[in-house]
Amino acid sequence: MGVDLSQLDEWEADLLRRYPQSTSVIGDGATAGFRDYDQAKDSVKEFYQCNHRFQTHDFVQGRKTEFASKNRRRMGIWEAMEFLNELVDESDPDTDLSQIEHLMQTSEAIRQDGNPDWFILAGLIHDLGKILCLYGEPQWAVVGDTFPVGCAFSKRIVYPEYFVENTDSDHPLYSTPLGVYEEGCGFSQVNLSWGHDEYLFQVVRDYLPDEALYMIRYHSFYPWHREGAYHYLMDDKDRAMLEWVQAFNPYDLYSKADQPPDVEGLKPYYMELIHRYFPDELDW
């Protein structure tokens, strides 16, 4: 099964452009030198135009309800990795690393730094939710920086001007700072835009420690963990977990290398690690 991944790859490349490793967080959470959107490819801008137009409160509620049934497949974690491997970048399928190799690059970088086994496992599986593409979800509903819906869209979200096309922008409740939420309610009570983070969280939420679950659920929530937005919705648990999401983020962005990992050689280690935390099969 071939799926054109060019837009997914361009989104990830744009993250590196927006968040270069050498930049530091300043002042209100803005990252120095990153807000130069004019340098982005037109395809990235078009992606976010769709993302910001269609990711409404009602859309997110509908997707979360539809996928809550978890009745599309029953498979183990390694089988899900192999399923994800069916994603092929048709723009250049002979040169890009496989999806499993990308996952292992992240987890191996985490392992080499001596991090806990659940941290390594979070790195290995954090992008498995991208199998949404194989279910036919549009790419703007799979990847992209995530953000709360049901309340006003922050100016710290990438391309905030595109929200003018979102029907929630002039909704009498959803366009207010708190919207449907209460101050300090915690992100567990907040609906973020739909994508691979939330989907995978719903699949694995019963099996991993909270630190790993936060990494999985919020690693694309750049307006929060890199831009300092939406702090008024945080609770004490969110504040405690923020450091773990920020610790994970560099491995997600900067661990890719030209030399692919030895998947077959590493498989026994990762199979044992997976079985420490997960049953043989999960509902997806």
Image (cartoon, helix red, strand yellow):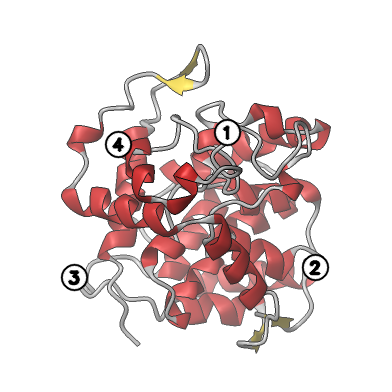
Q: Report the amino acid beneath label 2.
A: Arg
- Pointer 4 local density, CA inside 10 Å: few below 14, some 14–19, many at least 20: some
Q: Nearer the viewer, mark 1 or mark 2?
A: 1
Mark 1 vs 2, N-terminal side: 1
Q: Residue at the spot x=66%, y=35% of the render? A: 178
> Most extreme residue toward the top, as rendered?
27
Q: Earlier in the sequence, mark 4 or mark 1?
A: 4
Packing grade of label 2 (10 A; few <14, some 14-19, many >=20) is few
| 57 on left or right of 240 | left
Q: Which residue is mark 2?
A: 276
Q: In the image, what residue occupies the spot 22% across and 67% down?
A: 95
Tell me, for residue 225, which label it has, or none.
1
- Label 2, secondary structure: give it: helix
Label at residue 17: 4
The correct choice, above or below, for 81 with respect to 246 in the image is: below
Which one is earlier in the sequence, the residue at label 2 or at label 3?
Answer: 3
Secondary structure of the residue carrying numbered label 3 = loop
Q: Quadrant of the C terminus?
A: bottom right
The reply to whether the C-beta atoms of the residues labelled 1 and 2 are less than 8 Å apart is no
The CA span between labels 1 and 2 is: 29 Å
Q: Position of residue 165 (x, y in %)?
A: 35, 49
- The type of residue carrying mark 1 is His
Element assignment for label 4: helix
Q: Residues within 10 Å of mark 1 (few under 14, many from 20)?
A: many
Q: What is the secondary structure assignment of the residue under circle 1?
A: helix
